[in-house]
Amino acid sequence: MKIALRNKLYKLIKILTRVPFWQGLLAGALVLLLLIYPYSGATQENPSKKTLQVATRVIPPFVFQDKDKLSGFSIDLWRSVANEMGASFKFTVYPTVPDILNQVEQNKVDLGIAAISITAERQKKFDFSFPMFAAGLQILVRSSEEKTNIFPNLLQTFFSPTLLQMLGIAGALILIAAHIIWLFERHHQEAMISKSYFPGIFKASWWAAATLATQADEMPKGPLGRMIAIIWMFIGVIFVAYFTATVTTAMTVQQLQGDIRGIEDLPGRVVVTTAGSTASEFLRQQRIKAVEVGSIENAYETLLKNQADALVFDSPVLLYYAANEGKGKVEIVGSVFQEENYGIVLPSNSPYRRQINSALLTLKENGIYKTLYEKWFDVKKS
Ligand code: GLU
């Protein structure tokens, strides 16, 4: 027994000396690593196995929300991208773009998709996918039918400083002419004006005013009075011409100023946009003061309630509103003045960027992107 045991031990020692001990240790360690590693390695090499957390925000027609149901161009596009990647995901809706960016920056979500513009400033902190939509900024105003309410304009003209000044001058001229005519006419036998200052001067003023504007019912009888009347009538003609020219000019200028046709017409106007958007940043750079509201719906409301003269925002969003809910109430003016591209925003060095980009390219190549574009942007209508 003892001899057999010793033989077995002897054989084992012989095997151990043939396979060096350290080699065995290495093999063991490798097996152990292979057993443990696949789980941590999966997110690096095959990120699509995880449920991706996707941040978005309501911004028609890119993102609509009906109770818990999300739809829209960006939502459909992401679903197709995820499908290409074979990834599962979960959407979470945040109120604003800055909120989405915050979540991405803190790695609380894996990516953000809505109508998020790719900018140099954002690129410093985030990764972006390839552009997924070409957009830009444009101006929205209330419809011209709404604006061409002539009465407020007319009232404004009548109480304008120029007109009040002219009426003052006319009053002074009438008083002077009335005194002159009273002085020369009062002694005439069939005078139209009584001798005494009161009520003589009243009648004389009435005559001077009527002659200035149109034609008086009575004329002076004395030769001097008539000569003065002729001079006064000529003054009247000049005054009426001057008056007409001034009022017409004032109204034309007002009409021209009333029309916003481009960004050059925005300074001095009340402009509304959404807080933290690229539009608000653009207006700040142009030194155009803007009222900043939370959601785009609030911005539309501000414009429609006459609390703002113009709304500056992303062109496709405005176009969609003008063609649907805002039809007849608002209109787009001028062309796109700041071109921007939308992208999917990711944390810096995100492991998903490559896959997302490949998926986006595939969708563009296989026509799915085009189908989605045509679904949400009725090309013929816009
Ligand atoms: N495209 C703009 C941005 O990225 C506005 C988007 C929005 O307010 O939803 O800032």
Image (cartoon, grey):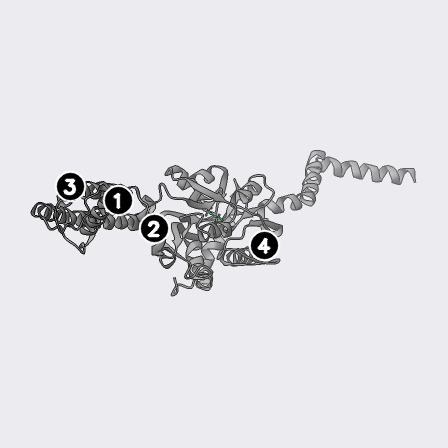
Is the residue marked by circle 1 packed among few (<14), some (14-19), or many (20+) residues within 10 Å?
Answer: few
Q: Are marks 3 and 4 in contact (CB under 8 Å)?
A: no
Q: Name the front one of labels 2 and 1.
A: 1
| Drawn side of residue 340 relative to residue 163, left or right | right
Residue at the far front in the pictured view: 189
> Residues under labels 2 and 4: Cα distance?
64 Å
Sequence-earlier tag: 4 or 1: 4
Q: Are marks 4 and 1 in contact (CB under 8 Å)?
A: no
Residue at the far left in the pictured view: 223
Amino acid type, callout 1: Leu
Residue 170 at x, y percent in the picture:
22, 44
In the rendering, which numbered label is found on residue 82?
none
Sequence-earlier tag: 3 or 1: 1
Frontmost residue, 225 versus 264: 225
Frontmost residue, 271 versus 349: 271
Q: Are marks 2 and 4 in contact (CB under 8 Å)?
A: no
Amino acid type, callout 4: Ala
* Label 2 lies in ligand 1 vicinity (Cβ under 8 Å): no
The residue that mark 1 highlights is: 167
- What residue is shown at x 75% (from left), y 39% (from top)? 15
The residue that mark 4 highlights is: 87
* Label 3 lies in ligand 1 vicinity (Cβ under 8 Å): no
> Residues under labels 3 and 4: Cα distance?
102 Å
Amino acid type, callout 2: Leu
| Drawn side of residue 62 relative to residue 168, left or right | right
The residue that mark 3 highlights is: 183
